[in-house]
């Protein structure tokens, strides 16, 4: 009997990326399910307070679609609850703000034909549109889009594009981490490695992620990134010296990757100054987030994004 697939979609990022992109994701996901040989269900996990009117026209869409209300929950909690509600042998996590490329779902599931494979990650990249998005495609923590097709073990994954065997994830859910927003996937990767579970990455299962929204989201995302990174560090790297070192490393890496990758994202030379200005501004805010965390300022500790 073919394994059943449960696709868990958090309906939290939609609050930032907007409903237009989320609806584009749903249309693309429906096409992926239509082309999949395995029976699929899709769970749309949301906080009914933050998203009080989750009304989606799923009539005629392939597979089973159902909302899962999880009051008072955010990003990782929604994923964990969705996994508990899922009935599939394989659980796929997809975010509400990413756009899968054609063939994404079949490619992500193919490695599970090997019974020893427990976790498969896809390849997530920033969609390089205008100069602002190109800046994040080149200098943020996501890699650039790839043309390669490979399956290899990796030490980390992105929570927006990954699949687990059900039993493996229920034994290793996203951990609860106080005072952070987005560090649970990093800790989970470490927990899996400690348990001897290999994370396999299939580079051809690609999804496009948006850049942070300009303005308030840009500022809060950067401050939270700095705060969350500091919480994961130990030894001297958790000191002010470590924060200064990361700031220099991030700016230097952004400078190098801009010149190395500009052709890949079709960035003209005239756009380089703007990209570097965005890069340096963002990582200056990350550094500020670390400094504010060192100083135990309540404002940065309360950021949830």
Image (tube, helix red, strand yellow):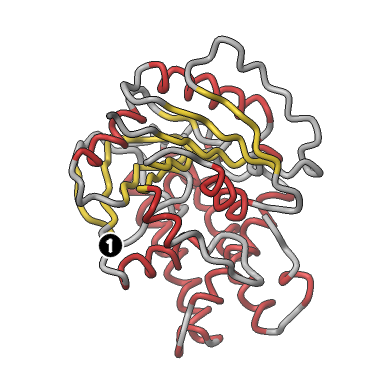
Left or right, residue 59 beside residue 155: right
Q: Residue 287: image x %, image y %?
A: 59, 71
Of residues 222 and 94, the one nearer the viewer is 94
Number of numbered markers = 1
Q: Quadrant of the N terminus?
A: top left
Question: Which picture quadrant has residue 228?
Answer: bottom right
Crowding around mark 1 (Cα neighbors within 10 Å: few <14, some 14 to 19, many 20+) is some
Of residues 154 and 53, the one nearer the viewer is 53
Residue 58 vertical placement versus 270 (above, below): above
Residue under pointer 1: 197
Q: Quadrant of the C terminus?
A: bottom right
Instruction: Name which residue lies at 37% across and 41% down.
Output: 89
Question: Which picture quadrant has residue 282?
Answer: bottom right
Q: Residue 266: image x %, image y %?
A: 38, 32
Instruction: Name which residue lies at 68% across and 41% down.
Output: 46
Q: Residue 223: image x %, image y %?
A: 65, 64
Instruction: Name which residue lies at 55% across and 38% down.
Output: 9
Residue 166 visible to an observer of this rendering: yes
Q: Residue 183: image x %, image y %?
A: 52, 64
Residue 92 vertical placement versus 187 (above, below): above
Left or right, residue 81 beside residue 194: right
Residue 288 visible to an observer of this rendering: no
Provide the secondary structure element on which disc 1 rests. Answer: loop
Of residues 236 and 252, the one nearer the viewer is 236
Spot the residue most to the front: 1
């Amino acid at each position: 009997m073919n394994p059943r697939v449960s696709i868990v979609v958090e309906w939290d990022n939609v609050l930032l990326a907007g409903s237009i992109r989320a609806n584009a994701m749903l249309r693309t996901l429906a096409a992926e399910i239509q082309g999949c040989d395995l029976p699929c269900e899709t769970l749309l996990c949301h906080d009914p307070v933050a998203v009080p009117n989750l009304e989606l026209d799923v009539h005629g869409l392939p597979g089973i679609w159902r909302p899962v209300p999880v009051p008072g929950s955010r990003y990782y909690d929604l994923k964990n609850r969705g996994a508990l509600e899922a009935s599939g042998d394989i659980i796929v996590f997809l975010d509400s703000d990413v756009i899968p490329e054609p063939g994404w779902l079949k490619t992500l599931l193919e490695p599970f034909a090997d019974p020893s494979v427990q976790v498969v990650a896809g390849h997530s990249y920033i969609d390089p549109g205008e100069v602002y998005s190109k800046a994040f495609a080149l200098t943020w923590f996501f890699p650039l889009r790839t043309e390669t097709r490979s399956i290899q073990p990796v030490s980390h994954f992105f929570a927006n594009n990954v699949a687990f065997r059900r039993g493996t994830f229920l034994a290793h859910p996203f951990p609860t981490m106080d005072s952070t927003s987005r560090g649970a996937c990093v800790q989970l990767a470490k927990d899996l490695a400690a348990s001897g579970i290999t994370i396999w990455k299939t580079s051809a299962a690609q999804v496009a992620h948006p850049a942070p929204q300009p303005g308030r989201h840009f500022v809060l995302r950067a401050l939270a990134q700095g705060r969350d990174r500091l919480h994961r560090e130990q030894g001297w790297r958790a000191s002010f010296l470590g924060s200064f070192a990361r700031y220099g490393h991030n700016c230097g890496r952004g400078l190098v990757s801009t010149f190395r990758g500009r052709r890949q994202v079709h960035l003209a030379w005239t756009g380089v100054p703007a990209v570097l200005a965005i890069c340096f501004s963002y990582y200056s805010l990350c550094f500020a987030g670390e400094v504010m965390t060192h100083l135990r300022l309540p404002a940065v500790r309360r950021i949830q994004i």
